Image (cartoon, rainbow, N blue to C red):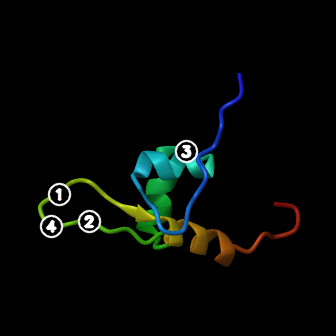
Amino acid sequence: MSQVKLRVESGSVYSRQEAAEALGISLSTLKRLIKKGHLRVSKPDGMRRVFITGESILGMLQDTVVERGA
């Protein structure tokens, strides 16, 4: 059974779960990327919900350097 990845659109906003699914990573890995500053998020005051823009996801992927043997 294959899973279809969510397509990341520049002008869209994603939840943590949606962003993790689009990147093909676990939610805990996504949270580490946010904590380390690799992904920018928006968290309105008084809300637990975190919003991640498509620009942030695409920017992180563009800035990522793949090392040989990785």
Asked which secondary structure carries label 2, the reply is loop
Q: Which residue is mark 4?
A: 45
Q: Is residue 54 above or below residue 25?
A: below
Which one is in front, 16 or 12? 12
Q: Residues within 10 Å of mark 2 (few under 14, many from 20)?
A: few
Judged from the image, the secondary structure of the residue bearing numbered disc 1 is loop
Q: Which residue is mark 1?
A: 47
Of labels 3 and 4, earlier in sequence is 3
The crowd level at tag 3 (other Cα within 10 Å; few <14, some 14-19, many 20+) is some
Q: Looking at the image, do the residues carrying marks 1 and 4 touch, with CB atoms under 8 Å apart?
A: yes
Instruction: Name the residue: 74% across, 74% down.
Output: 65
Residue 58 badge: none
Amino acid at dot 1: Met
Q: Which residue is mark 2?
A: 43
Labels 2 and 1 touching (C-beta < 8 A): yes
Front residue of 49/37: it is 49
Q: Residue furthest top?
A: 1
**Is there CB contact under 8 Å for labels 4 and 2?**
yes
Q: Amino acid at mark 3?
A: Glu
Tell me which numbered mark, 2 or 3, is placed earlier along the sequence: 3
Q: Is residue 55 left or right of residue 7?
A: left
Q: Residue pushed farthest bottom?
A: 63
State the mark number for residue 21.
3
Contact, CB < 8 Å: mark 3 with mark 4? no
Residue 53 spot, x, y in % from top left: 44, 66
Residue 8 in picture, x, y percent from top left:
58, 58
- When asked about the image quadrant of residue 31, the answer is bottom left
Instruction: Name the amino acid, label 4.
Output: Asp
